[in-house]
Image: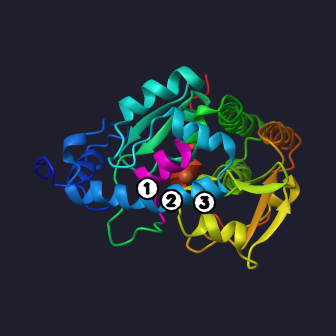
Amino acid sequence: MSTSITPGQGLTTTKAPFIENAQANGELYIHQPYELYSEENQATWRKMYEAIRPKWEKYANAKFMEGVENLMLKPDAIPRLDEINEFLSPLSGFSAKPVSGYVPAYLFFDCLRNRSFPTTITIRDGQSLDYLPEPDIFHDIAGHVPMHTDRKFSDVLVRFGEVARFAAIRARTLTSDQDEINRVVESNIKAMARFFWFTVEFGLMREKGEMKVYGSGLLSSSGEIEHCIESDLVQRFPIQLEWVVNQYFEIDKYQPLLFFVESFDHLFGLVDDLEQWLKDGKLDNVSPGEPAVNPEDLQSFLMAETE
Ligand SMILES: [Fe+2]
């Protein structure tokens, strides 16, 4: 049964009939029905942008700030994805692709390989401005997409997609024992998810002697972006692949442990290393713990179309 849709009724996270209908119909890739945003949704964007802008100027890496300018991100209105893509695509070939909700792991990585970024179009409730466990358009567009204007960073995302594809292909040729394939793929996904978390989502970078932020989870939180740089409660270490792929994390609190890279060339090299480790079987039995690999994610790798 579909729920009725009226202009301005809102695209609030977990409370949007448009999204519920799309999910009920099995539609993952959707459009952005801009007329549905409510006044409250627009006010939420304005408040969040206003709170984060001065923090970006202080803590964000230089490429991110260039990206914000190049995308002409507006402080006063939720962005239209079509307009963002007009600026974004000529710079790196990337585009923001609207989705109705959770994208299973393989499909997510494969979108990156094809220079598409699955993008949430709902916006958080005005009551929970600073933290939200699920992504929303503020996290995806204000936190991720400015980084995608940088050619090197966007190439890192494409490499991630290639590693995921390699993992899907490799698992099928390893053994005929399905339980063993499942175990290996689950470990590979866990390793990739951890690496992604500690770089693309929560990465720090040393830039001209100063610690700067490039991870989108930090860039979209006006509280944590400051905390991650200023607080004595945060441990910051040079990134080490063997550590990151075995390190569990919790998503519902400020991160106590972060890793820094020296440049995006450095990060790109690490994804090459990740692929080599995968080929060498070094990601086939990483330490247990978070993140949990849900059956949908596992299935997405097992059923991946890799041609
Ligand atoms: Fe994210």
Q: Is residue 112 magenta?
A: no
Q: Magenta span covers which residues?
A: 133-145
**Dot 1 amino acid type:** Tyr
Residue at position x 41%, y 68% in the image = 129
- Location of residue 265 (image quadrant): top right
**Which residue is identified by label 3?**
218
| First reached walking from the N terminus: tag 1 or tag 3 | 1
**Which residue is identified by label 2?**
52
- Residue 139: percent from the left, percent from the top? 48, 53
Residue at position x 73%, y 52% in the image = 195
Kindly report the distance in space between the C-alpha atoms of the residues bearing marks 3 and 2: 10 Å
- Residue 296: percent from the left, percent from the top? 51, 52
Judge from the rendering whether residue 105 lies leftward or rightward of residue 274; answer left or right: left
- Location of residue 115 (image quadrant): top right
**Dot 3 amino acid type:** Leu
Of tags 3 and 2, which is closer to the observer? Answer: 2
